[in-house]
Amino acid sequence: MELTQQDIKDIAELLPSADEGNRQISQITRNADLNWPRNRLFATAANLQLLTEGIVPGIEQTGAPAIGPSALPARMFSVSYGFISLKEGLAKEIEWPISRSGNFTFGISILATAPAGKVHQELLETSVHFARREFPVVVTYTGFKPHGIPPHPDHPSTVGSSACWVKPAMKNPPFDHGILTARHVIEHLSLGRAIDLDPSTDHSTPNRGYLADSGHCAVDAAVIEIDAADWPTGLSRLSLLGPFPNPSRVVSPSDAVTLDGRVTAAGRRSVLSHHPLPGYWGSMMGQRLVLDAQAQGGDSGALATHNHTGAGVGIYMGEIDDGKGGKNGLCQDLYQAVKYLEVDPYL
């Protein structure tokens, strides 16, 4: 569901000031030089993450998580913080904050697998208290449709896109040069399997690579090894947003990102919710960005870049239900992916 400027303004006017809450988050907001409404949106989302999780690497501990495990749905696969698109009528059950359109609230967004394919959305009885306000926790029971720029992976992989070039950042690496894509594009292949690569708009080679490394559990990322002779000249390190606590650039809910895939031409989308404090917790819980529009089949693995800074923020995965009968886009957080795979990204 498209996030409009009016929705952003309506919500931001209701949120606490950027100076309320955790002092380190207030300092991060000032250091990042965020203007209104991004300062309020980022600071509120970051405080909600800190309170919900109890502790964030690099940020002071707050104690027990604000949401107990017993309150969470059994099939939960993602938690993020920011705007939440709402099904028809759910806004009436939420005291605050609601956009005038009734299409969005701001709080904790939980995605869970829809049992037997029954897509629905509900409000948890639990809320998160911050700055004398109660923020809603909304669960969207959804399906997930994978939508599976260097040359793109093709036969024998699922048709998909690629995000960027990578070099290993580890000792004794299994490869020297590679291409980053989504894991679900190649998850049926064994390590070392040859993969045909299709040209992109920017690069006509390489034409072949080999599966070198892949994520596990919830990290939807993998590396396709390429020959050193096919590494392009003139590439630069792709900057990332993180780690904390000393960032100079951050992503705020409502920020514009550009997604450029195999099928979908480069286009603007808005971040609805994400992890505003991107630490690294391994692979058990995937860190996701929820976008206000999906792409198309074949775009899985595409890079999402942050329009404000040009930094890489996500690897496109596919579409999820928005609670209102439409679709949102879902991305793997790029920072988590490169930390898990121990690679440095280039573009």
Image (cartoon, rainbow, N blue to C red):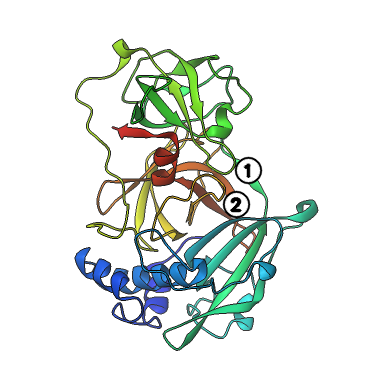
Image location (x, y in percent) of residue 25: 31, 70
Give the camera-side residue of 175 and 330: 175
Give the camera-side residue of 30 and 261: 30
Which residue in the structure is indicated by mark 1?
145
Q: Residue furthest right?
A: 116
Q: Tally the numbered discs.
A: 2
Q: In percent of the image, x 38 and y 63: which residue is there?
A: 254
The answer to whether any part of residue 56 appears in the image is yes
Q: In percent of the image, x 29 and y 70: which residue is there?
A: 24
- Disc 2 to disc 1: CB gap under 8 Å: yes
Q: Secondary structure at mark 2?
A: strand
Which residue in the structure is indicated by mark 2?
320
Image location (x, y in percent) of residue 269: 41, 53
Q: Is 197 above or below relative to 327?
A: above
Q: Is 91 above or below relative to 149?
A: below
Q: Judge left or right: residue 179 versus residue 35.
A: right
Mark found first going from the N terminus, 2 or 1:
1
Image location (x, y in percent) of residue 208: 45, 12
Q: Judge left or right: residue 14 versus residue 295.
A: left
- Amino acid found under the numbered disc labelled 2: Ile
Q: Judge left or right: residue 302 versus residue 232.
A: right
- Amino acid found under the numbered disc labelled 1: Lys
